[in-house]
Image (cartoon, coloured by chain):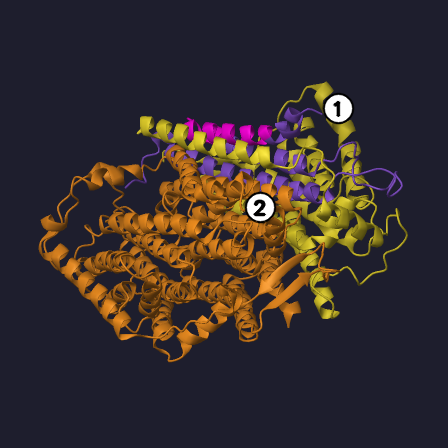
Chain colours: A yellow, B orange, C purple
Amino acid sequence: MKRLRLALLALGGAGLAALLVAACLDLPGFGGRSHPYGTRAVHASLTRRAANTIASVNFDQRAYDTLGEMSILFAAVLGCVVLLRQARDEHRAQPQPAEVARPVRRYALIVLPVALVTGLYVIAHGQLSPGGGFQGGVVAATALHLLYLGADYRALERIRPLAVYETSDALAVSSYLVLGLAGVLAGTAFLANTLLPYGTFNTLSSGGTVPLLNAAIGIEVASAVVVLLANFLDQAVEIEEEHGS
Amino acid sequence: MHHLLPLLVAIPLLGAALLVAVGRHLPRIAAEITGFVVSGGTAALALVLLLNSSPPMVEWVGGWLPVGGESVGIVVVGDGPSLGMAALVSLLTLAALAYSWRYFDEPPRGHPGAFTALMLLFQGAMCGFAIAGDLFNAFVFFELMSVTAYALTGYRIDDPKAVQGALTFGVVNSLGAYAMLMGIGLLYARTGELAMAKIGRGLDAAAGHGGADALVLASFVLVLTGLLVKAAAVPFHFWLPDAHAVAPTPVCMLLSGVMVELGVYGVWRVYGTVFAGPGGIPAADLTRALVTLGALTAATGAVMCWYQRHIKRLLAYSTVAHTGLFLVGIGVLTPQGDDGVALYILGHAGVKAALFACAGVLLDRYGCLDEHTLHGRAREMRATAVMFAVGGLGLAGLPPFGTGLGKAVTEEAVGGPLTVVYVAASAITAGAVLRVTARVFRGLGPRPEEADADLETSGSEEEPETTGPLRRIPDTMRMVPAVLLTAALAVGAVPGFGDLVARSVNEAGSGGAQASAQWTVHGALLGLASTALAVALAGLAVTRPHWTAAPDWSRPLRRLQSGHVGDYVAWLLMGATVLGVLALPAVLGG
Amino acid sequence: MTTVMHVLPYLVAAYVFLTGCYGLATSRNLIHAVGCLAVCQSSTYVLLLAVGYRDGATAPVFSDIKPGSRPVVDPVVQALTLTDIVVGATVTALLLALVLQIAKRHGTVDPDELRELRG
């Protein structure tokens, strides 16, 4: 069986490699000037007064893709909650307090607020500077987990009521959808950025609904990452197999 | 009206999000009723839109209407096939939710709505893929559909087989999706566009009079690899039996009934919109590729189906066989072929979902899915026995089932020797189902001998999906397959329905050419022939088991299904190469 | 730039994809296999970003440059890559959750030893 697999791999890999190399030789040269969609996207972003074109693509021009992307994250988190639930032959154990070296503890507790504020800053400035809801959400969520490194699992659990994060994850997804539906109700189109004034270029409130959708994503990602990590950490720290099974 | 198209995605997703948001405080029954209302509402919307889909609708999400033919937004398409698939998805989700009503396994603690929410996400994802008119957007919903499907397949974490099957499913399908994304990247590099229609025009403009080059061929191969993995075409099919045999029954109904078919639909949509122009892949090359792979798929699926004893695996292979038939049907690129496949998919969805529902009843009653162990044990289940047998006849294409009409129309479109593939594949898979009916529900024939234990998955030790083995079969579990079979019958029996489907399919594709989809004497006779052959095969298997036992030549074929994810990945690469070789004349000729 | 430089970034993407496939097919550990899948996916980032690059261009963010003063790289592929990264991370998480359960139910993460689904 193994020999067959290697033969298939060699043959299939060689064929695909030849195809890909031939395709690469036909691609337009690296660094070329012609990007019709990109040029249009920059123009559209400027007319809607969003300084970060990528945010405009993500939350305005192609906000429907972001809806799917957000749903993938939501589905994966729900899937992990389901897949990492306590099985029939398992029980929960109390996490044990752990000794942490003092420098680690000090460092973690100093960096935690800084990292959290950085995450929130990156979310809030999504339509102005590189970053946005996805990036800032991950930073904010991981910041909380410095508490696990700096103290122990029980300390983390105290500031991390999972039910709250699960609910805020779902509510953030709902609010993104409701903002989209508002466009339909207003008679324009789903996820149309026509409800709010576009504001002044390069300010926090510019870009119409872009900052709102961006904030929804920020909350969703932060909550989702917290829930996701919690489920994996639970497996490592709390869930144990029954003895004798 | 066209503004409502994205709601086909938004409503189920919103329903799922709200279920998770308040689900903690809801009793289970409230969560399930919410699921019904949301998926039913989406189904109603899909049907209303479908009735208004002539002429086809187009919607630019976010109101980014094209200016001078150029837009920066995402387009969704509301034509007959896309809305038809969305309606099928929604109705089947409704049926699956009804089937799982109350009796399905205990939900995770603290998340009474988790299963329903995942099903709604799955529904929204499939609707989103069906109506996508933008290639990258199609990829996004393709992935959403996959992610939810992996989680649903592995739902029963206490079963070692379930988690293994789900992982295999996940690895192979994700790799296929990444191949598809590479193809999208190549197409974007060439044309600078993402909307399917714009890419198609871009390819034509770039080719001038030259025809396709290596880049077009590579992007064609990569995009089709992703879609054919989903459609479970040989040699991309290995994940399907492993995933379908272990997924919870309501999920199997959706996976086999409509998700796999969405892969076929994706091939049809992407070829017709992106690669059908003079700068794409010529028709002859597509036909060669799809008919070859499709016929191989039908043959492999039928042979493997016949030699299964695990009932869900048997049904899964019959789905593989039928997908092969669908691929051949769309591969010949005639309006009549498209119509036939559309009807075949509708009929097959009803029949296959009903068969899975009946298999689920066996599992919940006896905790077993092994044809040999169950021999004669299910005599008491008369209603289920009748439905299983009727499902088998439907699979064979007995007139006036929708499967029969679809098969007849497709057979006429493909013509000649390929008709044999249709008759044989449908007869063998239906014969296997009828054999199971005779042995399990009637106890006919001798109990089969044990053989080849190292080559097969027996299914003798399975856990019921209910909280314990059922003593009495709940009405919902009996009603759902009955309704599904009736619907499959209605697809073929309601006068004029075939022509209605044909008109709506041809309006979307086929360049305006019209074909009719009605019963012909020829088609009905072929359907009767398949059915007679299926009954004969089943009878032979039951009365003379050693005549139809697995011959030695089938062993290597069965051994290929090794359950090893590395093997499946190697086959995926091989499949992409084969696809490239089959379509190679497109480049050499130009 | 030489001709080689004009195709090299694309060739890197193809190479990364095939490497990931090789690792996936020959993997002896499912956690490693999930990692290889992430390698395959990284090739799509490389390809998309390479496709969107423009000579001498900067990021398409206009908070500190005047619109039109400098060429910018294609913002669309950057948005696509962001979507792709999120997809990849979530798929990896979900697959690792499944591997975790496989380890518990089967007592192994070696695909050669998983022998329940066959034929």
Which quadrant of the figure has residue C11?
A: top right
**Residue A128 shows in this picture:** yes
x and y percent of residue C97 in the render? 50, 39
| Residue C18 in magenta stretch | yes
Q: Earlier in the sequence, mark 2 or mark 1?
A: 2
x and y percent of residue A43 in the render? 81, 50
- For disc 1, the marked residue is A107
Inter-mark Cα distance, 2 to 1: 30 Å
Query: What type of secondary structure mainly makes up the magenta span?
Result: helix
Q: Nearer the viewer, residue B401 or B11?
A: B401
- For the magenta stretch, what is the residue range? C11-33
Q: Chain of mark 2?
A: A
Dot 2 crowding, Cα within 10 Å, few <14, some 14–19, many 20+: many
Q: Residue at x 46, y 71 (%)?
A: B514
On screen, residue B236 versus residue A51, left or right, reads left
x and y percent of residue A71 in the render? 61, 51
| Quarter of the N terminus of chain B within the rendering | bottom right
- For disc 2, the marked residue is A77
